[in-house]
Amino acid sequence: MRSRPVRHALLLSTALVCVAVATPAVAAPARPTPPVVKVYPGDPTAASCPAAKVMTKRDAVYGQDPVRKMVALTFDDGPDPRWTPQILNILKQRKAKATFFVIGDNAARYPALMARIHREGHTVANHTWRHGYVDTMSAATLRNDLLRTNGTIKRTSGQRTICYFRPPGGRHNGVSDARVKALGMSSVLWSVDTNDWRRPGSLAIKNRAGAARSGDIVLMHDGGGNRSQTVAALPGILQIYAQRGIRTVGVNGR
């Protein structure tokens, strides 16, 4: 009589094992695959630069959208603790991107601004250490100036590569272009000059920039003087572009 409970327990254990074996394991829910974000040479997060050249317009730029109209906004001579934050605020509100050609000495003075420019998706580019004219520099002086500025940009902004350079005053020649190219950077000029540094009035700046066509590079300034007129003109410029279906981008076309 005492053996029956033991046999019943054995039979129950065997049944439970069979049920466990027969029941399929429930698979863990699949994790969603993160979207693939393409990084093009010359993008702020890229580890490489596009082939170096002299640019007056955004021709054959990596990542350029062949369908939508785009204008490249550029700001020179910053960063400036008064004007650059105001420009960044406007660009952020309008979801616009730009390229900032910075002075190396200013970059060293205002690292927090440099980090913000990069963090908010803009392209940081080289404008020499102290606005020097590259067409009068020796090969060694130019190389040291640009490498010093590049190193400061990387350290303060976190941007991995510096692919673009703008000669101060637009002063350049074949020799300086070749020297810049040897460092792997493209020399970027412009096709629309707002002359904002002359302070012609915010309306004049808005009208000049607003006349840009797809593919143009627009020159403005966020440093080097009083840029209140540029700040005042920028919302109207971006509104004109929006009404015309133009997207604002960096010189890399992104």
Image (cartoon, grey):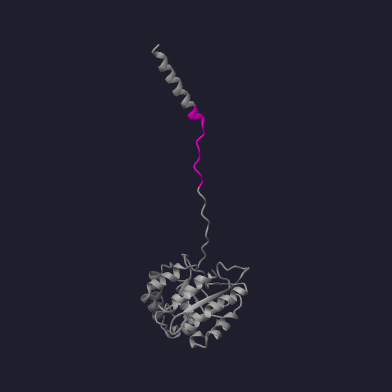
Residue 178 against residue 27 in the figure, above or below: below
Residue 130: image location, x then y, percent: 40, 82
Position of residue 253 measured from the top left corner of the image (x, y, whole percent): 55, 70
Image: 35 above or below 137 = above
User: Which of the image's four quarters has the N terminus?
Assistant: top left
**Residue 135 location, x and y as percent?**
45, 84
User: What secondary structure characterizes most of the magenta part?
Assistant: loop
Q: Which residues are magenta?
A: 19-30
Total tally of numbered discs in the picture:
0
Residue 209, located in which quarter of the rendered image?
Answer: bottom right
Asked if one can make out residue 153 in the rendered structure from this viewpoint, the answer is: no
Nearest the viewer among 119 and 183 is: 119
- Return the residue nearer the eye: 142 or 80: 80
Residue 210 x %, y %? 58, 80
Q: Which residue is most to the top? A: 1
Q: Is residue 138 covered in magenta?
A: no
Relative placement, left or right, of 34 versus 157 is: right
* Most foreground residue, 55 or 119: 119
- Does residue 27 show up magenta in the picture? yes
Where residue 143 sits, quadrant-wise, is: bottom left
Q: Residue at x 50, y 82 (%)?
A: 230
User: In what quadrant of the picture does the C terminus appear?
Assistant: bottom right
Residue in view at x 51 percent, y 71 percent: 93
Q: Residue 157 appears in which quarter of the rendering?
A: bottom left
Q: Residue at x 44, y 81 (%)?
A: 223
**Toward the viewer: 65 or 14?**
14
Q: Is residue 203 visible?
A: yes
